[in-house]
């Protein structure tokens, strides 16, 4: 029997939070071979949800609530959860209308089979909003379509050896998937989908496969550098297309092309290249400065039901041992006194 730590980001909707707690309790009741602890990470943005979790944690010691001073990003929230996890493995699920009692049972089964890293994702990709089109991840998905991204992972289970390594990350812009690939442990992917049959309720079907994580240069830069790179890329492509069109028009169609048209297209191309270089080098410089500063990835404001420190845990074990030895000694003294009383009574009768 082992201890499984489940990490959940706190959402702003209290009704979804109540549903998540019910699902977690169902998971603990169905997977009886392991103990569970539920770690909720709050970034200080949702006071109503935090109050509901505080009330829950007072009555159930399995719930641990970690409150950060501000929103440090999804990577920092995940690292905060595994830093204060005390289980033999750590799990993560995003809570997007997902029943963890069914999915995590499958992930735990693979972990019991010596899998260090187990991913869980929907077989059908989640539709994305138009506001996220042409963003940084949009271009990365086009360049690396076979790569697994942290946003696509609906559930994740990693062994204690892995999350101890992850807890030592000092870069707040690290890509969790790239870091897992860097560890060298062979991951396992579990894809699940809903299957509906006539006269039966919807149930989950699983497809297991071994995967290899692809490496790619991740650009997790501030918005200024990201915007500079995007604008520069757009202007460079626009200037190059304009120059090609003008050259084609002047050479093959014998049309008159003013010189200032070519000059304008060249200027646009050069400006685009410069803006793109500013974005790339600015992002690299920013990350280098972050490493030089050596600031913590996250700052914890408060912890409800904190894990026991090694010294506290060892002291409690020693106290329990002393109490057990003292109870055994008391039993021996009581037994010796009772036997002495019986022997004295026998002597009196004689």
Image (spheres, rainbow, N blue to C red):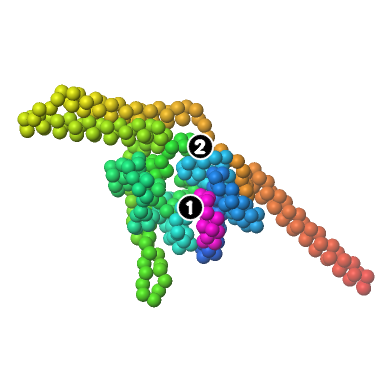
User: Regarding mark 1 in the picture, which secondary structure is present there?
Assistant: strand
Q: State the residue at coordinates (46%, 30%).
A: 290
Q: Is residue 194 magenta?
A: no
Q: Quadrant of residue 335?
A: bottom right
The label shown at residue 91 is 1
Residue in the image at 62% along x and 56% along y: 56
State the residue in front, 74 or 241. Answer: 241
With 23 as the anchor, is 265 left or right in this view? left
Q: Nearer the viewer, residue 246 or 160?
A: 246
Q: Is residue 126 above or below residue 219?
A: below
Q: Residues within 10 Å of mark 1 (few under 14, many from 20)?
A: many
User: Relative to 70, is 115 on the left or the right?
Assistant: left
**Secondary structure at numbered mark 2:** loop
Residue that badge 2 annotates = 297
Q: Which percent across, then down, holds residue 314? A: 65, 46
Quadrant of the image occupied by residue 232: top left
Q: Tell me if I can see residue 52 in this picture.
A: yes
**Residue range of the region highlighted in magenta in the rendering:** 4-23
Percent across and percent down for residue 329 are 77, 56
Identity of the residue drawn at 42% across and 43% down: 176
Say which of 178 and 8 sits in front.
8
Residue 24 visible: no
Numbered badge on residue 200: none
Q: Is residue 20 magenta?
A: yes
Q: Name the quarter where the C terminus is drawn.
A: bottom right
């Amino acid at each position: 029997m082992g201890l499984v730590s489940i990490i959940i980001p706190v959402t702003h909707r209290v009704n979804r939070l109540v549903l998540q707690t019910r699902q977690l309790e169902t998971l603990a009741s169905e997977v009886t071979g392991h103990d569970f602890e539920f770690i909720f990470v709050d970034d200080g943005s949702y006071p109503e949800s935090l109050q509901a979790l505080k009330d829950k944690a007072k009555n159930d010691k399995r719930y641990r609530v970690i409150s950060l001073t501000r929103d440090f990003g999804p990577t920092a929230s995940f690292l905060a959860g595994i830093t204060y996890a005390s289980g033999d493995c750590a799990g993560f699920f995003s809570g997007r209308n997902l029943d963890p009692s069914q999915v995590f049972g499958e992930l735990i089964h693979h972990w019991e089979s010596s899998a260090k890293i187990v991913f869980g994702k929907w077989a059908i990709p989640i539709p994305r909003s138009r506001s996220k089109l042409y963003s940084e991840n949009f271009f990365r998905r086009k360049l690396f379509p076979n790569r697994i991204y942290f946003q696509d992972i609906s559930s994740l289970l990693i062994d204690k050896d892995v999350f101890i390594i992850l807890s030592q990350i000092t870069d707040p812009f690290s890509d969790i998937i790239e870091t897992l690939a860097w560890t060298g442990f062979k991951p396992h992917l579990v894809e699940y989908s809903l299957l509906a049959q006539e006269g039966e309720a919807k149930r989950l079907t699983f497809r297991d496969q071994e995967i290899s994580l692809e490496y790619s240069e991740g650009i997790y830069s501030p918005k200024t550098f990201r915007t500079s790179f995007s604008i520069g890329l757009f202007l460079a492509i626009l200037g190059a297309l304009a120059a090609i069109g003008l050259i084609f028009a002047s050479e093959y169609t014998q049309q008159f092309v003013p010189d200032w048209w070519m000059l304008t297209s060249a200027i646009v191309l050069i400006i685009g290249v410069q803006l793109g270089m500013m974005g790339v080098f600015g992002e690299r410089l920013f990350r280098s400065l972050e490493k030089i500063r050596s600031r913590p990835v996250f700052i914890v404001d408060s912890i409800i039901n904190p894990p026991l420190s090694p010294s506290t845990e060892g002291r409690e074990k020693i106290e329990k041992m002393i109490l057990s030895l003292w109870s055994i000694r008391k039993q021996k003294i009581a037994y010796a006194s009772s036997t002495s009383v019986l022997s004295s009574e026998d002597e009196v009768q004689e």
